[in-house]
Image (cartoon, rainbow, N blue to C red):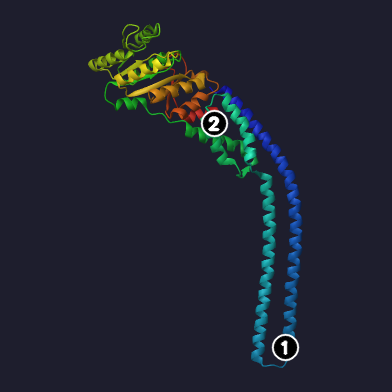
Amino acid sequence: MFKFLKEKLKNVFGKIKKDVEEKTEHDIEQLKEDEKKLEENAEKEEKQLEEKKQKVVAEKDEKKRILEELKGIDVDKKELKKEVKEIVEDEKEIEKKEVDVKEEEKKEKKGIFQLIKEKFTTTKLNEDDFERLFEELEKTLIENNVAMSVIDQIKRKLGEEIINKSINKKEIEEKIKEVLKEILSEILIEPFDLIERINKSKKPFVIVFFGINGGGKTTTISKIVHLLQKNKLKCVLAAADTFRAASIEQLEKHAANLGINVIKHQYGADPAAVAFDAIAHAKAAGKDVVLIDTAGRMHTKTDLMREMEKISRVSKPDLKIFVGESITGNDAVEQAQAFNKSIGIDAIILTKADVDEKGGAMISVSKVTGKPILFLGTGQKYGDLELFDKKKIIDSIFS
């Protein structure tokens, strides 16, 4: 899973690292010039501080000389004490100035060295730097069928986190990975618990499955039945795909393997009538869940959507699930959008996830529909249905 995407991301991160190293070399050259200027400024300020210090010392010596002269003059003792006191205070003030000068000198030197250290260990990417670095990442995401709306969100969020921010040069790759993980976590929606939802609802619980023919819809329905049976829920199938040749027989074969009934009509019959009869049967027989298989022909898209709308209107489903092939990438995303716009889906199941090397559909479909992925199909056996775990998915992309 995600083999192609992971390889591409490794290449992108490698290029980003190289670009940052080249920028670092440029920064170091600039730093040398800045350091030279800083040294010149430091020497200039040190000279000024020395002149200031000599001036303070001269003031101190002058006050001492005055004090000595006053001692030899015959004046009022009280007045003399006052003068002496003032001179002593002036002397203390001069000494304080000396201390302040030294502290200021230390502070200036410390500031210079801190600036030099920061320039060697950190970098700032401006908007032009970011655009250049993101270009490779954007290209990789497009190649892996990630929707443009998702790429735009990644670019906006990533830019907010790193443009004009001080970042450790050694950690920039990890910083970008960290931000990408946060963005994907926001995009991917945590799935709800299907079994819990069914158990808390009135019976029979009705689920309609939508999707294009050949996407694994019928097999997926059988996998869901297997899962429900493991949780002691009694199921019935509705063969509402009355258009595709052998669709009813295919569903009947799965039903026989799972030991459940299929409600069917003749080919060409009204699919909504099949769904209605299946629900009536479930009520009479005390079944817990009705699972409705539907047609998925695309060459009559308008008629298909009208048919799906009628099935939804008649069956009043508790859950509408879109089933699509993960490996078809943007096609699966567009299909999900179309069904969501016409019918309003509640959740998504992606098939063939085990052989999906790109992963674009998995990343994009939740974003564009606003609906969670419930399960991933990972094989042909009834047990090959994996609960969607966004943390596991994100970790596998960056492993």
Q: Where residue 225 appears, x then y in whole percent?
A: 36, 17
Marks 2 and 1 sit apart, C-alpha to C-alpha, by 87 Å
Decide: few, some or many residues near mark 2? Use Cα within 10 Å; few <14, some 14-19, many ≥20.
some
Q: Is residue 108 above or below residue 259?
A: below
Task: Report the residue at 67% width, 55% height from top.
Answer: 111
Question: Viewer-proximal residue, 368 or 252?
Answer: 368
The label on residue 306 is none
Tell me where residue 190 sits by quadrant: top left
Q: Where residue 104 appears, x then y in whole percent?
A: 67, 63
Q: Is residue 375 left or right of residue 287?
A: right
Q: Is residue 34 above or below residue 278?
A: below
Q: Is residue 13 above or below residue 316?
A: below
Q: Where residue 13 appears, x then y in whole percent?
A: 62, 32
Among numbered discs 2 and 1, the one appearing first in the sequence? 1
The label on residue 151 is 2
Q: Name the residue carrying label 1.
A: 71
Question: Viewer-proximal residue, 269 or 27?
Answer: 269
Task: Report the residue at 73% width, 69% height from top.
Answer: 53
Q: Where residue 295 appears, x then y in whole percent?
A: 39, 13
- Note whether residue 223 is visible: no
